[in-house]
Image (cartoon, rainbow, N blue to C red):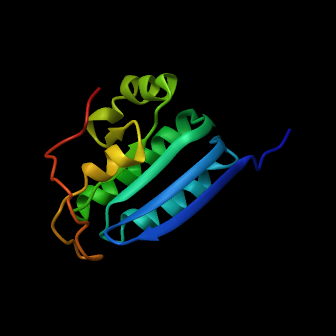
Amino acid sequence: MNHDSLTIGVRHEPGYVLITAAGEIGVFTVARLREDLFTLAGDGRPVIAGLDRVTFPGAAGLGALAGAARRAAARGTSLHVVCARPQGRQLLWLAGLDRTLRLARTLAEALQALPATPGPGGPARPGGTARPGPVRR
C-alpha cells in the first residue's frame, strides 16, 4: 500500500493563493495538506483549493478543510474549494462544509467569488465581485 499518494502544489497569484491536491487524502497524507492549508489560510489572502483530482478526501481531509476555513475566516479572508465532481460536492455538502467554505465548480467561478478590494496580502484582482457567503449549488 502506498501511504504517500498525495501530490500538493502551491501557486501564489496576485490577490490569492491556489493550492491543488491530487490523490488520496487519508490519515497518512493529511498532515502535509493540513500544514500547507493552515499556513496559507493564516497569510491573510484568499485561498483557493483545487480538489478535482482528489480521489478520496476522507474524514481527515474534510477536517483539514474545515480547520483551514475557520483559520482563514479568523484572519478576515476565505477558503474557496474548486470541485466539479458531483460526489465530492455531495460529500462536502453532507459534512456541512458548504456553510463554512465557498464551493465552486471551476477555478473561474472561484475567482469571481473573490473580493475586489485589496486584502492585507496583495492587490485587488481586477473585475472581482464580492460575495457575502458560500456559493451553494
Rendered location of residue 12, percent (x, y): 45, 70
Picture layout, residue 105 above or below residue 17: above
Residue 66 in sight here: no
Picture layout, residue 44 above or below residue 20: below
User: Residue at left 32%, top 44%?
Assistant: 109
Rendered location of residue 10, percent (x, y): 54, 64
Pick the quarter of the image with the C terminus.
Answer: top left
Which of 3/48 is in front? 48
Which residue is most to the front? 127
Rendered location of residue 76, percent (x, y): 21, 63
- Say left or right for 14 vs 113: right
User: Residue at left 32%, top 53%?
Assistant: 111
Which of 111/40 is in front? 111
Rendered location of residue 71, percent (x, y): 33, 58
- Say left or right for 86 vs 6: left
Quarter of image, res 77:
bottom left
Count how many numbered circles sit on residues in the image: 0
Quarter of image, res 15:
bottom left
Picture layout, residue 56 above or below residue 121: above
User: Residue at left 86%, top 38%?
Assistant: 1
Which residue is most to the right? 1
Residue 25 in sight here: yes
- Say left or right for 89 vs 119: right
